[in-house]
Image (cartoon, rainbow, N blue to C red):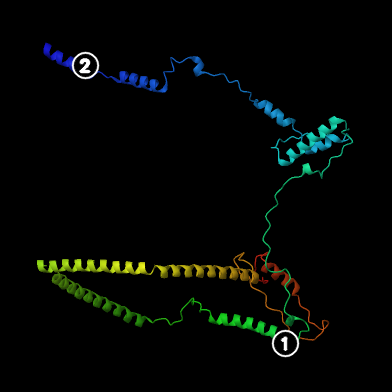
């Protein structure tokens, strides 16, 4: 019995935990690395008295309240007007800072011997000016506000100029007609046809069944042919055939390598030609960029940029027909084109979004 007890005691010794000792060793090493434990450190090193000269919050608020606004400084000089106290506290802006500077200068002048009531506030003083940045202005349009029409559009034009302007108007109209004719035909909403009677429907259904049977027979024949081809392919490959294939592959690799070397040597020899081609491409790119810039400027001169969902449609040229030319302003037929012309000018310059002529329902 005694031996058994001794064994149990030894087992109990093995189960004793050493967590406290490990924690103590870890804390001691950490304190040694950080410069000593906090428990043994003196109170002077742990606590410091704050002797800074910071202004308290209450004093800061009182300082802001003591500031005088510009209108108050102006009203203080007039003895007949009492200053209105401001109820809302705002952040000091640039105007308020300028007013405070002007007030401080006026106070210095008053101390020298001048009377404050007789002084007048100089609003045009250089010190009270502000450097306010203006808003960004829109770029001016290349199109003039009032465009001068050709001489052929006059009420009493010359014969040649009238014919030229009339030919231009006819060309514009013909261009619209040709464009409409050359446009692709719209897709029809419905296809014209006749309804199929019931007897014909029955025959159509029977034909569809026969086609399905034919398709099944064709599929079975195709599957049989594929099986035969697969069997012919699954023949045993001999060592002679395998060696031939390996030699052919090695030969192809060698030929490809030789071709690559030849191509590389040709490229090295053609370096000056490549440099010349690069220079020509760069020159072509510059020319293309220049053409694009010129075309953009011409497009801006002819019409405005795209503002809304609709494109700008220029008004047709106002040319009188040969029968309408009277040679006198008194006999000229009246028409309301001035308002329309001004509105089109605003659209062309990009000041108004283009719109469609609205019609009353």
Q: Can residue 361 be seen in this view?
A: no
Q: Name the residue under label 2.
A: 13
Q: Name the residue under label 1.
A: 160
Q: Quadrant of residue 51?
A: top right
Q: Quadrant of residue 173?
A: bottom right
**Where is the N terminus found, in terms of image quarters?**
top left
In x, y percent, where is residue 178? Answer: 57, 82
Q: In which quarter of the image is residue 275?
A: bottom left
Q: Distance between the residues labelled 2 and 1?
A: 128 Å
Above-or-below relation of 125 to 353? above
Q: Which residue is drawn at 22% across and 76% down?
A: 218
The reply to whether discs 2 and 1 touch (Cβ–Cβ < 8 Å) is no
Of residues 351 and 181, the one nearer the viewer is: 351
Above-or-below relation of 42 to 351? above
Q: Which numbered dot is residue 42?
A: none
In x, y percent, where is residue 138? Answer: 67, 59
In x, y percent, where is residue 263? Answer: 32, 69
């Amino acid at each position: 019995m005694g031996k058994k007890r001794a064994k149990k005691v030894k087992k109990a010794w093995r189960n004793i935990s050493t967590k406290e000792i490990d924690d103590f060793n870890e804390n001691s090493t950490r304190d040694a690395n950080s410069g000593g434990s906090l428990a043994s450190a003196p109170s002077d090193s742990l606590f410091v008295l704050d002797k800074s000269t910071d202004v308290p919050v209450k004093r800061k608020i009182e300082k802001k309240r003591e500031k005088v606004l510009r209108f108050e400084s102006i009203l203080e000089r007039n003895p007949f007007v009492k200053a209105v106290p401001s109820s809302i506290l705002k952040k000091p802006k640039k105007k308020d800072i300028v007013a405070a500077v002007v007030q401080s200068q006026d106070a210095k002048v008053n101390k020298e011997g001048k009377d404050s009531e007789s002084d007048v506030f100089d609003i045009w003083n250089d010190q009270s000016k502000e450097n306010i940045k203006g808003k960004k202005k829109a770029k001016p349009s290349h199109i003039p506000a009032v465009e001068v029409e050709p001489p052929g559009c006059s009420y009493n034009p010359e014969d040649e100029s009238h014919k030229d302007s009339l030919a231009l108007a006819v060309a514009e109209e013909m261009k619209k007609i040709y464009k409409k004719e050359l446009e692709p035909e719209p897709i029809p909403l419905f296809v014209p046809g006749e309804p199929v009677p019931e007897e014909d429907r029955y025959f159509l259904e029977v034909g569809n069944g026969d086609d399905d049977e034919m398709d099944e027979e064709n599929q079975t024949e195709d599957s049989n042919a594929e099986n035969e081809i697969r069997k012919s392919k699954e023949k045993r490959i001999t060592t002679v055939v395998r060696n031939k294939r390996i030699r052919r592959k090695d030969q192809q690799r060698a030929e490809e390598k030789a071709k690559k070397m030849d191509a590389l040597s040709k490229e090295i020899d053609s370096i000056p030609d490549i440099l010349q081609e690069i220079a020509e491409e760069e020159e072509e790119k510059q020319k293309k960029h220049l053409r694009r810039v010129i075309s953009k400027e011409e497009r801006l001169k002819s019409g405005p940029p795209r503002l809304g969902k609709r494109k700008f449609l220029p008004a047709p040229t106002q040319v009188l027909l040969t029968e309408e030319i009277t040679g006198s302003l008194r006999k000229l037929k009246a028409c309301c084109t001035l308002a329309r012309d001004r509105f089109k000018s605003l659209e062309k310059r990009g000041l108004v979004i283009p719109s469609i002529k609205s019609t009353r329902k």
